[in-house]
Amino acid sequence: MGALVAAAIASEIALGKRKLQIGLSKVLVVWTVVYLALMFLLFRHTDIGMVSITIFWGGAFLSWFGIRSHLES
Amino acid sequence: MISFDWYSLCALGLVAFTFYRFRTIRSFLIISVVVGIGFGIATSGLVARSTQEIALANVGLWLYILGLLIVRTMLKRSVSLHLLFRISSGHRGVMAEDIETRLEDLHRFALVDRKNGMNALTIWGRLVSSFVAIVYKIAGMNR
């Protein structure tokens, strides 16, 4: 949950006043960095596999993108 | 990779294929929900690395379905996308139909009421628009 909030806040900072479609590459960088950090932490402290983390993170990004884009349009 | 990982990847693939193959919102929703429930039942008896892993993959799959559902809705209902498509294919003058459909939706959800031939926000509509305005303000979105 913390990682999701961090990614959402960092995305807003990265976007600034830009529209989501224009700043999408910056947002993708942000979500990738937080994903790698999350994976590192979960690998160190839990036995959760990479596939589950990736599915969760991909789903979270898609949901965030959908809601954010829908609000903006 | 353990069998749980393969199950997860198959479920993800099925949802992605459904999004690609079935263009209506209802078809996508029905098939995806069946896949989501099926995945939940199938993986509950599987050996995973931990119960957290099963929960994480299940939540992830549902988030994936939700995200694709929103994207499909946007693709189906975007007035500007339809306009671009019609211009590129040489059809014009039907944009008003798209906007009319959106207005009908507002009526269906009781957000707008027709008075003396004019559309006006209902109390519920005002509440929703105020909430949206607050979200825009918090997120710092330019309108």
Image (cartoon, coloured by chain):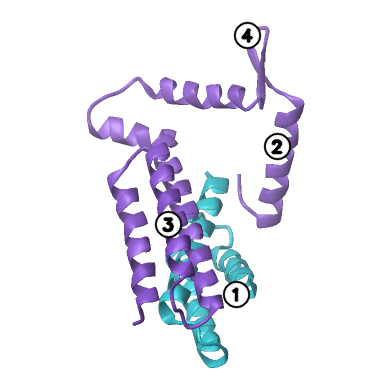
Distance from disc 4 to disc 1, alpha carbons, whole Å, reads 50 Å
> Label 1 near label 2: C-beta < 8 Å?
no
- Mark 4 lies on a secondary structure that is loop
Residue on which disc 2 sits: B128
Q: In the rendered image, what is the letter of the chain coloured purple?
A: B
Residue B83 located left or right of residue B99: left
Q: Report whether B114 appears left or right of B75.
A: right
- Chain on which label 1 sits: A
Determine the residue located farthest toward the left in the rendered image: B89
Q: Amino acid at mark 2?
A: Val
Residue B109, image x and y in percent?
62, 28
How far is disc 2 from disc 1 in space, using C-alphas? 29 Å
Chain A image colour: cyan
Q: Position of residue A15 (x, y in %)?
A: 54, 63
Chain on which label 3 sits: B
Q: Secondary structure at mark 2?
A: helix
